[in-house]
Amino acid sequence: MSTIFTKIINGEIPSYKIAEDDDFYAFLDINPNAVGHTLCVPKKEVDRLLDLDEETYQGLMAFSRKVGLAIEAAISCNRVGMTVIGLEVPHVHVHLIPLNGMQDATFQHKVSLSPEEFTAIAEKIRAKIQ
Ligand code: AMP
């Protein structure tokens, strides 16, 4: 059975899309630690980061860097942090999180956003993708 992220990539489940190429897809995390919290996912369905083949791993890092630079340009923050967890969704994803303090990296403090706010944030970040 497909993962929820494959369903998002295939358009079966909606997402606030940030970027896409042949191999990767980026969208806003629906339960964000901070405004602009984004997930970067390889289209290839692999559970664990370190099980990715070398090319996909390097490609995911390059794609995440491009998206992270756009987040930094669009969202006021001290820096963009990157983390990989994967305990909830068994499909590799890089969390890109705008950080203003350690609390933004803990996954204990969440921000609540309306659909209109998610849409506006995604548009802002998309406009900065190079
Ligand atoms: P983890 O697998 O522990 O790295 O966490 C999975 C992340 O995916 C969490 O931050 C969730 O909020 C996020 N997530 C789960 N379902 C969706 C969805 N449908 N759209 C966007 N983000 C999601």
Image: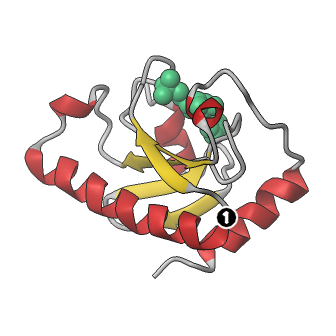
Q: Residues within 10 Å of mark 1 (few under 14, many from 20)?
A: some
* 23 with respect to 59 (left or right): right
Q: Position of residue 33 (x, y in %)?
A: 67, 36
For the image shown, how many numbered marks are present on the structure? 1
- Quarter of the image with the N terminus in it: top left
Q: Position of residue 82 (x, y in %)?
A: 42, 44
The residue at the point 67 percent across, 21 percent down is 108
Tell me if residue 61 can be seen: yes
Q: Does 89 sit above or below residue 74?
A: above
Secondary structure, mark 1, is loop
> Residue 126 versus residue 77: which sits nearer the camera?
77
Q: What's the colour scheme?
A: secondary structure
Ligand 1 quarter of the rendering: top right
The residue at the point 72 percent across, 26 percent down is 109
* 47 with respect to 32 (left or right): left
What's the residue type where badge 1 is placed?
A: Ile
The residue at the point 63 percent across, 80 percent down is 127
Tell me if residue 94 can be seen: no
The residue that label 1 is drawn on is 75
Question: Which residue is farthest left?
Answer: 54
Q: Position of residue 26 (x, y in %)?
A: 50, 55
The residue at the point 29 percent across, 44 percent down is 44
Question: Which residue is farthest top?
Answer: 87
Q: Position of residue 43 (x, y in %)?
A: 36, 49
